[in-house]
């Protein structure tokens, strides 16, 4: 980031150092996304009364004859599980910068 941008941000935000403020903003945004993924995981656990690992191991998609709803749920759930892991790692890395 250019020094001009950093100086302007410091003036606007009246906080220094701006780099830590940016890291905090990134962490907050990631936590918001993490919450969304956690809600999806919780909703799917309630809907199917099992964890994603159990859902996959029991081959529920095949048992439900590859219905659109179940396949769509599988994709959304898998994305949420992957997102939870990925975002937690990113938050951890960013928190080390503070």
Image (cartoon, rainbow, N blue to C red):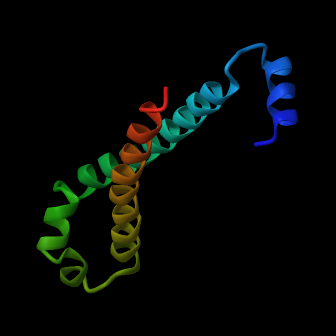
- 2 sits left or right of 78 in the view: right
**Image position, residue 3 (x, y; %):** 82, 35
The answer to which image quadrant residue 28 occupies is top right
Q: Is residue 42 left or right of residue 22?
A: left
The residue positioned farthest toward the front in the image shown: 3
Question: In the rendered image, which quarter contains the N terminus?
Answer: top right
Residue at the image position 39 percent from the left and 73 percent from the top: 69
Q: Residue 96: image x %, image y %?
A: 42, 32
Q: On the picture, is 57 further left or further right than 77?
A: left
The image shows residue 84, relative to residue 93, as above or below, that is: below
**Going 58% across and 37% down the picture, which residue do you hit?**
26
Q: Residue 65, position in %: x, y?
A: 26, 86
Taking depth in this image into account, of 29 and 36 the one nearest to the observer is: 29
Q: Name, please, the residue furthest toward the top.
A: 14
Q: Name above or below for residue 65 compared with residue 38.
A: below
Q: Residue at the location (51% across, 41% down)?
A: 30
Number of labels in the image equals 0
């Amino acid at each position: 980031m250019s020094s001009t941008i950093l100086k302007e941000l410091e003036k606007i935000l009246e906080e220094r150092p701006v780099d830590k403020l940016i890291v905090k903003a990134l962490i907050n945004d990631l936590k918001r996304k993490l919450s969304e993924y956690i809600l999806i995981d919780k909703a799917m656990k309630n809907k199917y009364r099992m964890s994603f690992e159990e859902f996959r191991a029991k081959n529920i998609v095949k048992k439900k004859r590859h219905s659109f709803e179940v396949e769509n749920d599988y994709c959304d759930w898998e994305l949420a599980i992957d997102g939870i892991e990925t975002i937690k790692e990113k938050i951890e890395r960013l928190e080390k910068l503070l």
